[in-house]
Amino acid sequence: MRLLQTDTFTLERPLESAVGGYDDGNGNWVPKSTKSHIIKAKASIQPLSGIDLQKLPEAFKDVESYLVFTKLLLRSVDSEEGIEADILKFDNKSYEVQRVEYWRQLRTKHYKCWVVKVERP
C-alpha cells in the first residue's frame, strides 16, 4: 500500500560527525562541519490540525508548519545524543523536523513528522 498523494522533497541530513564538540583527542573544541547528505524522497505533506499544532513547542505555534507522512525515518534534534534535525526542502523553502512518531494506518507503516519553516540559504 502506498501513501496518498505524494510530493517530492529534498532532505538535507547533517553528517553524524558534523556536530561540534571536544572531539580531537586533546580536549579541544572541534567546530561543526557544514557537510551533509542530500537525499531526494517522497512524502504526503499535509496542513496541521489543531490537535497536531498543540504537539509543537509554544515557540513554533506561529511559524509555518506542516505534517509530513513518509516511509523514510526522519530525524529531529536530540541534544543529548548530539544529533541535528533533518532539513526538508520543498516549495523553495526549508523546514526543520521538530517531532517524529511511528504511524500505522491500516497496512501502511510510515512516520508522521512535524516540520517548521526555518530561514536558511
Image (cartoon, helix red, strand yellow):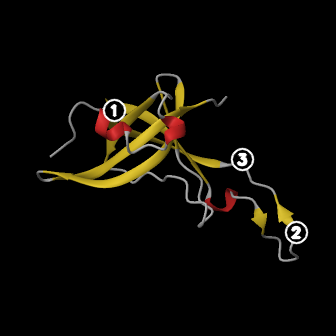
Image mark for residue 34: 3
Observer-side mark, 2 or 1, equals 1
Quote the CA–CA distance across marks 3 and 1.
Answer: 31 Å
Structural crowding at the residue carrying mark 1, measured as other residues with C-alpha within 10 Å and reported as few (<14), some (14–19) or many (≥20): some
Q: Amino acid at mark 2?
A: Asn
The residue singled out by tag 2 in the image is 28
Task: Please identify the residue farthest to the top as the structure is shown.
Answer: 91
Task: First in sequence, mark 3 or 2: give its number.
Answer: 2
Between 94 and 50, the one lying in front of the other is: 50
Q: Kindly report the distance in space between the C-alpha atoms of the residues bearing marks 3 and 2.
A: 19 Å
Q: Residue 15: x and y, percent?
A: 62, 56
Q: Which mark is residue 48?
A: 1
Quarter of the image where the C terminus is located: top right
Asked if 17 appears above or below 98 in the picture, the reply is: below
Q: Kindly check if marks 2 and 1 are in contact, taking CB atoms under 8 A apart as contact.
A: no
Amino acid type at image mark 3: Thr
Secondary structure of the residue carrying numbered label 1: loop
